[in-house]
């Protein structure tokens, strides 16, 4: 899948003709030229909303196109660039590690895109891709003020004119989608419609040109009408015939991991690794729970932990309140260099993401120069929930997981990694990345911070009891990621049903029923979401190997700084850069 530190959905657009001429000059010059052409002619041309986020605003008037003609054109363009980059043969100079690894990163990205379009085929299965692409295409133009409001509104109008056609393509492409995908689309659409009815007009209330505002009123009404018609079609027509299989199968799963994460271990070996880490974290949870409440079962302690949460109206402030202690600890304990004092903005999750995420970090793209705000998104309970459902939902934001989530999303997780991105050694490293690096780093930080002493009395916790609760929260989050690891493989290889996955999240992952439902939905459409635990384990092994290599000279802060300055490629590439060898990542 495409990777940028941004919020966007996979998309396709207009057909393009790619010149087949070979670039001239050294192989490094050839690679740079062909990579630049790939980004311009394929990568961003077929995902213009991603280009907007990245900071390339020449694409702001374009919208993703899921028509079959566009899909076929993108496939042809990808195959052409695959041949062109394969033809560029590096020499053996060790000084050329960055361009050599960049070549592998670009090739892997192309192959992943081909796998997605030709084999996994979300354009033929996932109704939410279409409606959420509409929402995201508008959101990225209104979220950051990278240009005057009239200019951004002009781009939005151009995109809105293309949205009814995008939704029309869905009716052609979606013949027998998985039931769960259609359900997710139906669940999210009312919020998306409300988003266009209220949030989008409000975001451009300061536009000045009366003619432009009048034109926007027309295009926006047309989008709302098209979305309502789409929702009705999903409910009355598509849902009853949504009997397709969401599973991608073992072969596609293995290839996706190889292309996205450069991990080629057999799936049975990966399952062994996942189960071992799950059992390790369960045992640790039981030990801490016994210390906290010797006479209670761990699940009873978990239930007690879940009740210790802020009220929904205090949740955003609870996250904001974590920043001072986290930043102070990181600096005083030399955990990692924080390149900027600017903090992320905590806000509610955008409506088109609510169904499948509890919290996320939305950072500006590496080439955005005018609007550089970063947003820490938190999903509040749905107003339609009953009081009992709200209580179950808020268990996921207990005192322990609030800290764990703040570490993951902000300090020193995603946000700090974003602050290091300008130091990445190449354009490829700034645009393309691996989730085992991005999510692996953030998940690794959750455990690392507590292991280094954060959350002890006087250092993030007021007493020993709160310290134990923080550790239980970290372990509960680790068990959530362990469950994703196993559920993703088992569901997509046909060994676990939706119902069994929900039960697994509750029984083995120590999650509430509400969380289990959301996580299972996500796993149906994000099969390799094992990358959290997988990446964390890779980073921990790299750290231990660096300790053995450097001995007394090892510095945790230097290790983290050196890791982050690589950009966010697969850990395999960072390992070779830091250790100088191709030893196994696990």
Image: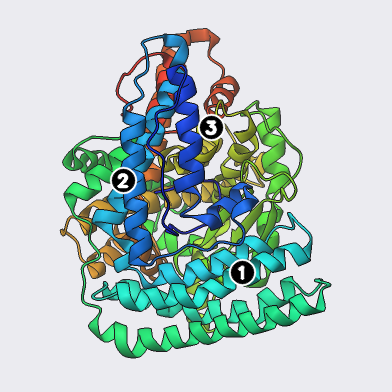
Q: Quadrant of the C terminus?
A: top left
Q: Is residue 3 visible?
A: no
Sequence order check, earlier mark of 2 and 1: 1
Q: Residue at x 63, y 46 (%)?
A: 463
Instruction: Determine which residue is flagged by label 1.
Output: 158
In front of the other: label 3 or label 2?
Answer: 3
Residues at marks 2 and 1, CA–CA distance in whole angstroms? 49 Å
Q: State whether residue 434 is above or below residue 214.
A: above
Residues at marks 3 and 1, CA–CA distance in whole angstroms? 34 Å
Circle 2 Cα neighbour tier, 10 Å, few/some/many (<14 / 14–19 / ≥20): many
Q: Quadrant of residue 191?
A: bottom right
For the residues labelled 2 and 1, say whether their Cβ atoms are less than 8 Å apart. Answer: no
Instruction: Determine which residue is flagged by label 2.
Output: 278
Q: Quadrant of residue 340?
A: top right
Q: Secondary structure at mark 1?
A: helix
Circle 3 Cα neighbour tier, 10 Å, few/some/many (<14 / 14–19 / ≥20): many
Q: Secondary structure at mark 2?
A: helix
Q: Position of residue 198 (x, y in %)?
A: 67, 80
In front of the other: label 3 or label 1?
Answer: 1
Q: Position of residue 446 (x, y in %)?
A: 51, 42
The answer to whether 487 appears left or right of 409 in the picture is: left
**Quick one: 457 or 232, which is closer to the camera?**
232
Circle 1 Cα neighbour tier, 10 Å, few/some/many (<14 / 14–19 / ≥20): some
Instruction: Determine which residue is flagged by label 3.
Output: 567
């Amino acid at each position: 899948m495409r990777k940028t530190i941004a919020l966007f959905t996979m998309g396709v657009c207009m057909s393009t003709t790619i010149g087949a001429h070979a670039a001239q000059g050294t192989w490094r010059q050839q690679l740079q030229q062909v990579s630049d052409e790939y980004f311009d002619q394929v990568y961003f041309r077929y995902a213009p909303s991603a280009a907007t986020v990245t900071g390339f605003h020449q694409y702001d008037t374009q919208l993703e196109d899921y028509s079959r003609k566009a899909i076929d054109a993108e496939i042809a363009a990808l195959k052409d660039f695959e041949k062109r980059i394969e033809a560029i043969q590096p020499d053996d100079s060790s000084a050329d590690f960055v361009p050599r690894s960049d070549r592998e990163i670009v090739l892997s990205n192309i192959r992943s895109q081909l796998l997605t379009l030709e084999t996994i085929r979300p354009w033929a299965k996932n109704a939410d891709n279409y409606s959420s692409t509409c929402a995201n295409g508008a959101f990225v133009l209104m979220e950051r003020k990278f240009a005057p409001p009239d200019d951004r509104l002009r781009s939005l109008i151009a995109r809105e004119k293309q949205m009814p056609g995008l939704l029309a393509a869905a009716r052609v492409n979606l013949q027998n989608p998985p039931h769960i995908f259609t359900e997710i689309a139906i669940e999210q659409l009312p919020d998306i419609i409300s988003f266009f009815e209220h949030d989008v007009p409000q975001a451009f209330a300061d536009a000045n040109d009366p003619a432009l505002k009048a034109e926007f009123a027309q295009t926006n009404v047309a989008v709302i009408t098209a979305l309502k018609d789409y929702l009705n079609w999903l409910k009355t027509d598509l849902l009853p015939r949504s009997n397709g299989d969401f599973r991608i199968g073992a072969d596609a799963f293995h290839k996706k991991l190889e292309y996205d994460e450069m991990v080629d271990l057999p799936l049975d070996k990966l399952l062994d690794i996942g189960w071992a880490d799950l059992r390790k974290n369960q045992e640790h949870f039981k030990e801490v729970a016994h210390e906290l409440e010797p006479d209670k079962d761990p699940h009873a302690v978990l239930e007690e932990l879940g009740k210790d949460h802020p009220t929904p109206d205090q949740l955003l402030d609870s996250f904001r309140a974590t920043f001072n202690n986290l930043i102070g600890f990181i600096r005083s304990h030399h955990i990692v260099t924080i390149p900027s004092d600017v903090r992320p903005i905590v806000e509610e999750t955008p409506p088109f993401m609510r169904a499948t995420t509890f919290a996320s970090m939305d950072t500006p793209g590496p080439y955005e120069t005018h609007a550089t705000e970063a947003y820490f998104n938190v999903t509040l309970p749905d107003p339609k929930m009953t009081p009992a459902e709200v209580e179950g939902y808020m268990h996921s934001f207990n005192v322990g997981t609030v800290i764990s989530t703040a570490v993951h999303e902000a300090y020193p997780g995603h946000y700090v990694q974003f602050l290091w991105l300008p130091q990445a050694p190449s354009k490829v490293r700034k645009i393309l990345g691996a989730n085992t690096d991005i999510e692996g780093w953030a998940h690794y930080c959750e455990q690392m911070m507590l292991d280094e002493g954060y959350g002890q009395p006087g250092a993030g916790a007021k007493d020993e009891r709160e310290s134990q609760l923080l550790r239980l929260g970290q372990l509960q989050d680790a068990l959530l990621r362990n469950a994703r690891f196993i559920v993703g493989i088992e569901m997509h290889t046909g060994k676990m049903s939706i119902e069994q996955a929900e039960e697994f999240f509750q029984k083995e992952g120590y999650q509430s029923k509400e969380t289990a439902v959301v996580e299972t939905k996500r796993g149906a459409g994000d099969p390799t979401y094992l990358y959290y635990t997988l990446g964390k384990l890779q980073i921990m092994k790299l750290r231990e190997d660096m300790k053995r290599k450097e001995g007394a000279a090892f510095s945790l802060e230097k290790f983290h700084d050196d890791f982050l300055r690589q950009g966010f490629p697969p850990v395999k590439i960072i390992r070779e850069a830091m250790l100088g060898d191709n030893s196994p990542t696990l």
